[in-house]
Image (cartoon, rainbow, N blue to C red):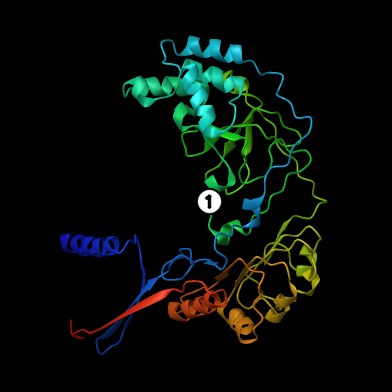
Amino acid sequence: MQDEVDAVERVQSALADVGLDSISFVVEMSATGRTVLHLLTLGPAVEAGIGPYPGSLLLVEGAVPEPWRRSPHPVPGAVPAPSVDPALVERTLRDRIPGATGATEAEIAAAEARLGVALPDELKALYRVTRGRWQDWGDDYAAAERVARAVGCELSPLDEVCIVDAPSRPCPWRFAATEAVVTPPDAAVQGAVGSPGWIAFGDNGGGDRIAVDLTPGPRGHVGQIIMLDHEQNIGASLLADSLTDLVMQRRSNWHASHREDQPPAVARVNIRSLTSVQAAAHPRLEVLSIGVWDGEPFSLSPVTGLPRLRTLTAYPGTLADPLEIAKLSGLEYLELGPEEWHVLLDAGAVPRSLSAAAIEAPGNRHPLPIVAIANELLALWDRPPISQTILEHQLDPGV
């Protein structure tokens, strides 16, 4: 086992010497012992994929998916909840955690200057009682737990309070491009990726951030408390109408309702969801994902000309005519199987509106032809290719 560890460490050291933390590889071995090792360096224009397969290809440097470009809409008339009571927050917390070290006014002002936003009065009241620094508790886990119980979440130090904007919530193109920002008229929380008004000040203990929301949805309150699920790429859920309610353990039982008569911005056509592209077609459609299908391939004519369609993903073999893609003028992300990409490349019909693309390669397809297609696509945008280093050696077939 030590031999294996030593071998891995040699590889890790070699990668570190050239500034890499990982590398993909393909090994071809014949019965005669001839062995070829292909080392694949993805480069700056390719996101990591699964195993040796490339992830999304970044065709336009610096481009981000549409949901990550969206800012929350202002909600005229939004006001704080009636329950807001900074004095009650401070008084209650001083009773629950006596002797805690609070932040000074200068420290609070410094945090506001760093964030570029004024902290809500309730949050200031909280940090006046305790600034949340681990050293103030003397590495006492019990003290930290008392603070968490008193506040209603695991509190972040004041100097770690941060804005949860879209760039702070990164996501690979392959997943981000299939999201959509949707805020129903009865939503308490906006369905955004992030917001300059989401101020994260804590954690639920499971990796989900807790934040004050200064940009609520149409049915929300300024200063409400929301939770951002670490397993979700977009949106947040309502925890409490105010920080006062969170501290006083008056959590919200509000649930968003979704109008079924409004077609979704994201449509999935497959054996378990919608069964036709026609059923997905709607002027508000942004994302069309065609998955596993055991019937006749689909025509894309029902979605041609839709004004907001920006993402198309299609499982290999599900398109009747891949060249119909050329009529989808607004695509920014396209994910197809190798054969469909070959059709577009051979016809010179790859949409030039794309900002990113990916190759769907189900099963155990040989990775090198997939890499070749990726490099063809990258070359169309003059982007850095996936580089290959080939090493050959003759092994003893008897070993």
Q: Nearer the viewer, residue 109 or 286?
A: 109
Compared across the picture, whether 16 is left or right of 58 comes to left
Quarter of image, res 264: bottom right
Work out whether 81 lies above or below 312.
Answer: above
Quadrant of the rendering where the N terminus is positioned: bottom left
Give the residue displayed 55% in from the left and 59% down from the top: 62
Residue 67 seen: yes
Mark 1 is surrounded, within 10 Å at the Cα level, by few (under 14), some (14 to 19) or many (20 or more) other residues, namely few
In percent of width and height, residue 267 lies at 71, 60
Is residue 123 rendered to the left or right of residue 156? right
Element type at marker 1? loop
Q: Is residue 216 left or right of residue 138?
A: right
Q: State the residue position of label 1.
A: 170
- Looking at this view, is 167 or 31 the one in front? 167
Q: Quadrant for the C terminus, please.
A: bottom left
386 in relation to 142, above or below: below
x, y percent for residue 363: 49, 74
**Quadrant of the rendered structure where residue 367 is?**
bottom left
Q: Is residue 221 left or right of residue 24?
A: right
Out of 203 and 214, give the one closest to the viewer.
Answer: 214
Please, is residue 124 above or below residue 342 in the view?
above
The type of residue carrying mark 1 is Pro
What residue is at 70 percent from the left and 81 percent from the top?
323
- Say which residue appears at 58% left-offset and 42% top-offset: 165
